[in-house]
Image: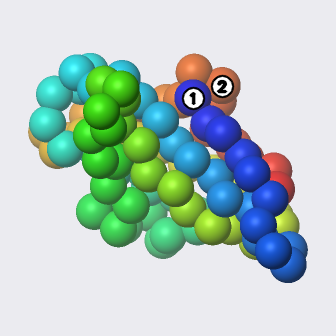
Amino acid sequence: MIKKSRLLGNKTRVTFCLPGDVPAGRVSVVGSFNGWEPGTHELMQRRDGTRTVSVPLSPGHYEFRYLASDGVWLDDEHGSELRI
């Protein structure tokens, strides 16, 4: 699940969210906004049982996927592209 909220200026905060238990282990969101670099935006466990990470993005078109620590790639339920 992805949530978007406007920040001051032209940036938008994009929050990436996954269930807390699937997949097990660490998960990062990687994409064209961070050079597809694992670990740069790692999802953190929240009290409500989900894992999230928020990334401020400028207007544009971005591709992304989730990468689990065991090398498993996952797609978001709403696709793998963002338009800000």
Amino acid under label 1? Met
On the rendered image, what quadrant is the C terminus found in? bottom right
Q: What residue lies at 63% left-to-right and 67% top-to-bottom?
A: 56
Q: Is residue 59 above or below residue 24?
A: below
Specify whether residue 73 is in view.
no
Question: Mark 1: few, some, or many residues within 10 Å (few <14, many ≥20)?
Answer: few
Specify whether residue 78 is in view.
yes
Q: What residue lies at 16% left-to-right and 28% top-to-bottom?
A: 24
Question: Mark 2: few, some, or many residues within 10 Å (few <14, many ≥20)?
Answer: few
Q: Are marks 1 and 2 in contact (CB under 8 Å)?
A: yes
Q: Is residue 36 above or below residue 5?
A: below
**Which label's residue is closer to the chain start, 1 or 2?**
1
Amino acid under label 2? His
Q: Secondary structure at mark 2?
A: loop
On the rendered image, what quadrant is the N terminus found in? top right
Q: What residue lies at 27% left-to-right and 40% top-to-bottom?
A: 45
Q: Secondary structure at mark 1?
A: loop
Q: Nearer the viewer, mark 1 or mark 2?
A: 1
Q: What is the x, y in percent for residue 55?
A: 55, 62
Q: Mark 1 — residue? A: 1
Residue at the extreme bottom: 9
Q: Is residue 3 left or right of residue 69?
A: right
Q: Mark 2 — residue? A: 78
Q: Is residue 57 left or right of residue 45?
A: right
Q: Is residue 23 above or below residue 60?
A: above
Q: Is residue 32 left or right of residue 84?
A: left
